[in-house]
C-alpha cells in the first residue's frame, strides 16, 4: 500500500517533505520517525464503504454481538493508549453497561509520552477529542479535532502559536503524529464511524492506562496543566472496563 521512504540525509528530506500527507511535516523528535509516500486510494467515502464495507461490517457487528451490545450503538468511546500501543473500542450493552468491543494494536505512533504542543513536534495528542469526518482519498482515515478548545486555551495562556493539526486515526505503516492501525482494523472503525455518526463518538488519547499505572513522564518538563489533564483522563478510563475482548 505504501512505498516507505527511509530516513537518510537532509537532501532527501528536502525532496520528500512535499509528499508527506495526513500527518504533520517532519521535524526532529526523540522517537524514530519514517516519512512515507502513500499510494492514494483515490476513493470517496461512499466508494470506500461500498468496497470495504460489507466484510468490515460483518466483523464489527460480530464483535458487538459477542458482548451482547446492540449495533449500531447509540454512542461509542474509543481509547488510544500510547504506551500499550492499543486502540480500544467501548459501547454499552442492552443493560446499559460499558463493554469493551475490540482492541486494535497500533502499528505506529510517534513522539514521546506527553501532550502535543506545537507544529512539527511529531507528538500524538493527549486529551479528549472528537472525530470530524471520514476520508478515503489517500487512505482510510478519520480526522481528529486537534487542536480542541482546551488545546487552544492552554496555548493562549502560554503564548504558544502554530499548534499543528491534520491529526488522524488512519491505516498505514508509519506515523508523524497520528494513530496508525492496519487496514482490517481501520476498515472496521471506518464503517463503525459511518454507521454511528462522528458526533456520537468520543475519543480519548492517553499516555497509558492511567487507571492502572503512572505514566513515565517528567512533569517538571511538562506544562503545569498536564497533571490536571491526566487526573481527568484517569477518571474517564477508570469508568471503562479495560481489558475486555480483542
Image: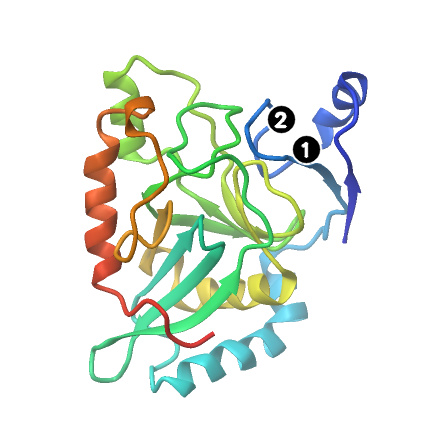
> Disc 2 or disc 1, which is closer to the eye?
2
Other residues around mark 2 within 10 Å, as few (<14) / some (14–19) / many (≥20): some
Which residue is more in the foreground, 31 or 115?
31
Which residue is more in the foreground, 142 or 203?
203
| Residue plotted at (42% across, 53% down) | 80
Q: Position of residue 93 (x, y in %)?
A: 28, 80
Q: Quadrant of the N terminus?
A: bottom right
- For the rendered model, the colour scheme is rainbow
> In the picture shown, does residue 159 fall above or below 116?
above
What secondary structure is marked by label 2? loop
> In the picture shown, does residue 103 fall above or below 97?
above
Q: Position of residue 23 (x, y in %)?
A: 57, 37
Q: Position of residue 139 (x, y in %)?
A: 65, 51
Give the residue number, with chain letter if any, for mark 2: 26
**Mark seen at residue 112:** none
Give the residue number, with chain letter if any, for mark 1: 20
Dot 2 and dot 1 residues touching (CB under 8 Å): yes
What secondary structure is marked by label 1? loop
Residue 63 vs residue 135: left or right?
left
Task: Specify which label sits upstream in the sequence, 2 or 1.
Answer: 1
| Residue plotted at (35% across, 15% down) | 160
Q: Position of residue 228 (x, y in %)?
A: 19, 37
What is the number of callouts on the image? 2
Q: CA distance from mark 2 to mark 1?
A: 8 Å
Q: Name the quadrant containing residue 59.
A: bottom right
> In the picture shown, does residue 112 fall above or below 54?
above
Other residues around mark 1 within 10 Å, as few (<14) / some (14–19) / many (≥20): some
> In the picture shown, does residue 5 fall above or below 18?
below
Residue 195 vs residue 24: left or right?
left
Amino acid at each position: 500500500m505504501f512505498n516507505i521512504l527511509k530516513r537518510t540525509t537532509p537532501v532527501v528530506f528536502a525532496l520528500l517533505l512535499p509528499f508527506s500527507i495526513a500527518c504533520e511535516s517532519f521535524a526532529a523528535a526523540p522517537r524514530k520517525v519514517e516519512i512515507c509516500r502513500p499510494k492514494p486510494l483515490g476513493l470517496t467515502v461512499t466508494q470506500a464503504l461500498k468496497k470495504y464495507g460489507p466484510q468490515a461490517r460483518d466483523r464489527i457487528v460480530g464483535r458487538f454481538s459477542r458482548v451482547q451490545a446492540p449495533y449500531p450503538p447509540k454512542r461509542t468511546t474509543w481509547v488510544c493508549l500510547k504506551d500499550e500501543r492499543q486502540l480500544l473500542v467501548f459501547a454499552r450493552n442492552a443493560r446499559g453497561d460499558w463493554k469493551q468491543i475490540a482492541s486494535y494494536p497500533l502499528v505506529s505512533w510517534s513522539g514521546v509520552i506527553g501532550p502535543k504542543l506545537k507544529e512539527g513536534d511529531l507528538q500524538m495528542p493527549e486529551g479528549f477529542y472528537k472525530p470530524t469526518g471520514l476520508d478515503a482519498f489517500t487512505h482510510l482515515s478519520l480526522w481528529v479535532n486537534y487542536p480542541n478548545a482546551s488545546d487552544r486555551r492552554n496555548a493562549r495562556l502560554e503564548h504558544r502559536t502554530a499548534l499543528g493539526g491534520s491529526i488522524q486515526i488512519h491505516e498505514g505503516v508509519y506515523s508523524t503524529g497520528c494513530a496508525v492501525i492496519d487496514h482490517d482494523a481501520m476498515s472496521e472503525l471506518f464503517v463503525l464511524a459511518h454507521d454511528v455518526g462522528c458526533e456520537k463518538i468520543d475519543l480519548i488519547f492517553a499516555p497509558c492506562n492511567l487507571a492502572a499505572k503512572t505514566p513515565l513522564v517528567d512533569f517538571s518538563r511538562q506544562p503545569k496543566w498536564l497533571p490536571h489533564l491526566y487526573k481527568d483522563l484517569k477518571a474517564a478510563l477508570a469508568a471503562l472496563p479495560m481489558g475486555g475482548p480483542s
